[in-house]
Amino acid sequence: MTALLLLLLTPLLGGLTLALLRPLNLAGWLNLAVSLLTLGAAVWLAWLVATVGVIAGPYFRVDAFNVYLVVLTAFVGVTTSIFSRPYMRHVCASGKISARSMRVYHSMYQAFMLTMLLALTTDNLGVLWVAVEGATLATVLLVSLYRTPEAVEAAWKYFILCGVGIALALFGTVLTYFAAQHVMADPAAGLTWSALYERAHELNPTVMRIAFVFLLVGYGTKVGLVPMHQWLPDAHSEGPTPMSAVLSGLLLNVALYAVVRVKMLVDGSLATTATPHLAGALLMGFGLVSFVVAGLFLHRQRDIKRMFSYSSIEHMGLMTFAFGLGGPLATFGALLHMLVHSLTKSAIFVTVGHATHLAGTQAIDQIRGLIRTQPAIGWSLLLGVVAIAGFPPFGVFTSEFLLLTATMQSQPWFAVVLLTGLAVAFAGLFRHLHPMVYGPAPEGQQPVQANLLPVFIHLGLVLWLGLSIPDFLAVWLDRATQLITGMHLL
């Protein structure tokens, strides 16, 4: 439990220190140091799970599924901290935010990381709900950081929509507790996920059906599923770019993790009923609609960050569909897609931050000729979009190929829809990308100092995963797949 305590106490104490720290030139370095220490604790925890097995304690449980996301969350937290240190310093120097707002940014960044890690490691559905609600509050402060009318409006939209969603999730949690009271000898275990999972077949199926609908809509709002997605494009476009990287790379994954955990309970409860696959069917429906709608909306965007936020909705829809489809191949592919999407999309947002700094705007039609004015930024954006569009040899191609194969085996007509949706999204992305990268460069545009180390790290890893999935990762994903589906793939 020492590794788990270190994992949670590091961002907690780091956030409190950053809230009080006066020398702003130290804040960025301290934020990075805290993130590195958190990553060290996450790797330690993963090593313990790999060697010892499940780590369990009061209110906490770490297994192959959640520790996988813990390491991913901590890793993206580090690389985004590397980018945010010079980026936010430039934002402060330009007068867009005050010194006080800088303290808010760094402290809320660590608060956000704390809530994500707490949501992933807790074994209690009530604590999970509290952690996701805490993430909402931290993100509201980050979205409104610039204090412009548009940023404040986006923060309020985020707060209201996600507040409604989290309220629905609370009601679903209460219903789950109600169902548990009739089968659990210890009332305190009524919200403990592992205890509920062991006796899921005894939970009242009617109550669990209703509970799942509320939990899916509630946490699905955080995932960005259509039609509860309206907060996501505004939050991305109005908040600081580092926040966009962790929103798409981390928050959406954690919310989907919550949905999958609840689905596992409901599947056990409904296993012997007339509708054993109800939870999976609902996930497939919401996922497919989100996937298709987001791909269509990509074509209409005029703001570069909004465009990539719709790309995130598209990919989260694809993952939701895959988890709903079930089976070892689809689940393995969805877990791999969580990894490659997080790495690729956060790399894209880091590049977008530099591109908008160079152009002085987020308007797509005013970002032109990046390869001519600053080749490193232009090539990074081009490679990022090629990767996220699912081109080989990047890892997104591998995960999407697995998902399409699984769909073709069980639901061939849905595979046609997925292929069509991928083609539509590809057309939308490259329609906007070509002039931004290859168009005529504006006159008098001055190069900016670009910190692209996180981009190179992320895209390098995604390329590696496209060429060959290392044995340790394949075994890790297979263990997580077995935990979710009860079946091994390898």
Image (tube, rainbow, N blue to C red):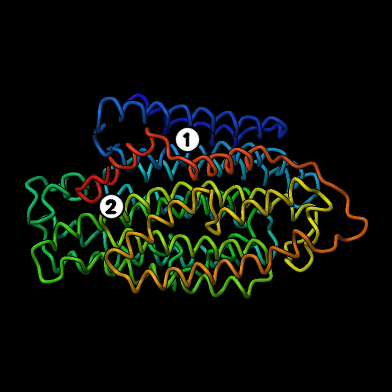
Q: Nearer the viewer, mark 1 or mark 2?
A: 2
- Above or below 36: residue 161: below
**Label 1 neighbour load within 10 Å: few <14, some 14-19, many 20+:** some
The mark tally for this picture is 2
Nearer-the-camera pick, 267 or 413: 413
Q: Which residue is mark 2?
A: 261
- Above or below 63: residue 383: below
Q: Position of residue 181 (x, y in %)?
A: 11, 55
The residue at the point 38 percent across, 61 percent down is 404
- Position of 298 compared to 7: left or right? right
Residue that extends furthest to the right in the rendered view of this protein = 444
The residue at the point 30 percent across, 42 percent down is 478
**Label 2 neighbour load within 10 Å: few <14, some 14-19, many 20+:** some
Q: Amino acid at mark 2?
A: Arg
Q: Position of residue 128 (x, y in %)?
A: 33, 49
- Position of 221 compared to 110: left or right? left
Q: Position of residue 70 (x, y in %)?
A: 41, 39
Say the numbered circle drawn on residue 26: none
The residue at the point 68 percent across, 48 percent down is 380
For marks 1 and 2, the one nearer the N-term is 1
Quadrant position of residue 473: top left
Distance, label 1 to label 2, CA atoms, is 25 Å
Q: Which residue is mark 1?
A: 12
Nearer-the-camera pick, 273 or 490: 490
Q: Position of residue 405 (x, y in %)?
A: 35, 59
Quadrant position of residue 56: top left
Where, quadrant-wise, is the C terminus in this rendering? top left
